[in-house]
Amino acid sequence: MRNTFFLFILIFVFSCKDSKSLDISKPAEETEIAETEVDSLITNESTSDLSAISTKDFRDFKVLDSENLAKAEIWSLISPQMSGFKEADYNRLKPLVLEQDITTLQKHIADGKFNYQDLTKFYLYRIREFDRENRLSLNSVIAINPNVIKQAYKLDEVDDYDEIHPIHGMPILLKDNVNASDMVTTAGALALKDNFVEDAFIVSQLKSKGALILGKANLSEWAYFFCGDCPSGYSAIGGQTLNPYGRRIFDTGGSSSGSGVSVSANFCAAAIGSETAGSILSPASQNSTVGFKPTVGLVSRSGIVPISSTLDTAGPITKNVMDNAILLDAIFGEDTSDAKTIYAIWEPGFYYEKIKDASLKGKRFGAPKRLLQDTLYANALKVLKQQGAVIVEIDEEKLGLPNFLRLLNLDMKKDLPAYMEGYANKDIMLRTVSDVMNFNLKDSLKTMPYGQNLFKGIADDNGDDNYLERIKDTLKTNGKQYFDIPMKANNLDGFLSINNYHAAFAAVAEYPALTVPMGYTSKGEPKGLTFIGKRLQEKQLLEWAYVYEQASKARVAPKDYN
């Protein structure tokens, strides 16, 4: 969430100042648009509501390893099942699995090089080796499914590999605000440490296609709408998630921090994140992965700990675009218990089957002039042009997002009790934000070392339903106009951004956005090229991103985890 609001601020600043365009046909001296540079330009007026969650430079963390979850606790049930899997087995599988896409993994399995149980144990071995309580620890995984090896064994009984969905047998990590049986769903909070529940709708979707739920990924607690004065990637349960490209140096992005990090470090075949406004795009781009925030309603939100029923959505985080298309194909679907659900008639395979036939020839993309000073962005535009795309430099609409924070306040004030009543464990008596705050006060050092200022703001916000509806209408109108006006004026197919710089506008417009690795700064920090389209343009975004990815080959795995 912190990075989400940075993006709003970035757009605010960009829309209020002029800039010279960069000639992307010539080599440019390396320049980078940094969050700290933007922060220095923010006016008092624009920060009045956002200062609690604007970008902060964290190097000295109050907490690194979790004080509420030990490594031994995570592995107590699964390690005995790993006794037959040795270092030699891991090393044999390493060149066959590391950095490979799902299609390649399935081919290796069909060819008999290994099976789903081997693949599952490979990822478990890596998580146990690297993720916690060592010099390379990332703290990205918060729980392991104790039955996943047994489930993988059953999935190995495949007669015809051509008849299964490509997600079959693939070990998937879920952000720990997504309900899943066999594991607790905590949203990173001690208040939910006993929240054993049934599967969320999207988990049922995954399982119906044969996916393996490997475990849970850490997250910024309560999806980063909790503390205000804390680093992204921190939760009381999971500790501080760290970026594999620079532990304690680069931000992990939030709030799907563990999902982004675990995919980048090859701890799973793919992961599920969730986004309100930037919480998939931010960690995906910060960890050099592909992250997709779908049109709100395409993917069910039922059984996911919420912030906002207006803006929330789940979505895939993967190492490459093809895997992203496969995972999206596995989770979308109509959920009649979700008020925003979309009835999509597409058959399985819709998102991935013809993606390799995609072309950018004649596609027109809007590039905000302010972003052209970023060298990586300018180089990405050059790659797109070489693939036949037309790049149109555009001025951004001078539109704001008034009362964005209050929308989140008022939604979560009613949506959290609805989750607790309908989807949480019935033995948990907590229902409201105030209930959670009171629980935290009983042992504040363990539950909230950075405070709970954002929760306090939710509890104190007395806006009524009519006021909330007016906020929604204004924000959705502004968000849609922000993209629709330049797209119509310039006959654009899509909009090009960096990381989650325009996530808040895409969120309120309820438009899809997909980020794909575009390289690394001079300091080695990853950045993503972000494609934004209109409602239900997921297939087009995947196709555009696939062509760019194949032409640029920008992703490089974090070196210390190879």
Image (cartoon, rainbow, N blue to C red):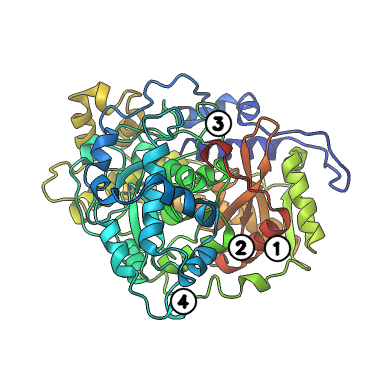
Residue 51, how many percent across, how many down?
A: 49, 27
Q: What secondary structure is marked by label 1?
A: helix
Q: Is residue 88 visible?
A: yes
Q: Residues within 10 Å of mark 4 (few under 14, many from 20)?
A: few
Which residue type carries mark 1? Lys
Q: Which mark is residue 488?
A: 1
* Amino acid type at mark 3: Gly
Q: Residue at x 46, y 76 (%)?
A: 348
Q: Is residue 21 positioned above or below 31 on the image?
A: below
Position of 255 with respect to 216 (left or right) is right
Viewer-nearest of discs 4 and 3? 3
Mark 4 or 2, nearer chain start: 4
For the C terminus, give its image quadrant. top right
- Residue 347 place in picture, x, y as percent: 47, 79
Mark 2 falls on what kind of element? helix
The residue at the point 48 percent across, 78 percent down is: 346
- Closest to the camera, between mark 3 and mark 1, is 3
Query: Answer yes or no: do the residues labelled 4 and 2 have beta carbons within 8 Å?
Result: no
Do labels 3 and 2 touch, CB within 8 Å? Answer: no
Closer to the camera in the image, 10 or 164: 164
Asked whether disc 4 touches disc 3, contact meaning CB atoms under 8 Å apart, the reply is no
Could you tell which of marks 3 and 2 lies nearer the N-terminus? 3
Q: Secondary structure at mark 3?
A: loop
Three-letter residue code for mark 2: Leu
**Label 4 sits on what residue type?**
Pro
Q: Give the mark toward the camera: 1 or 4.
A: 4
Query: SS of the residue at dot 4?
Result: loop
* N-terminal-most mark, 3 or 1: 3
**In this view of the protein, which residue sits in the foreground, 432 or 254?**
254
Q: CA distance from mark 4 to mark 2?
A: 18 Å
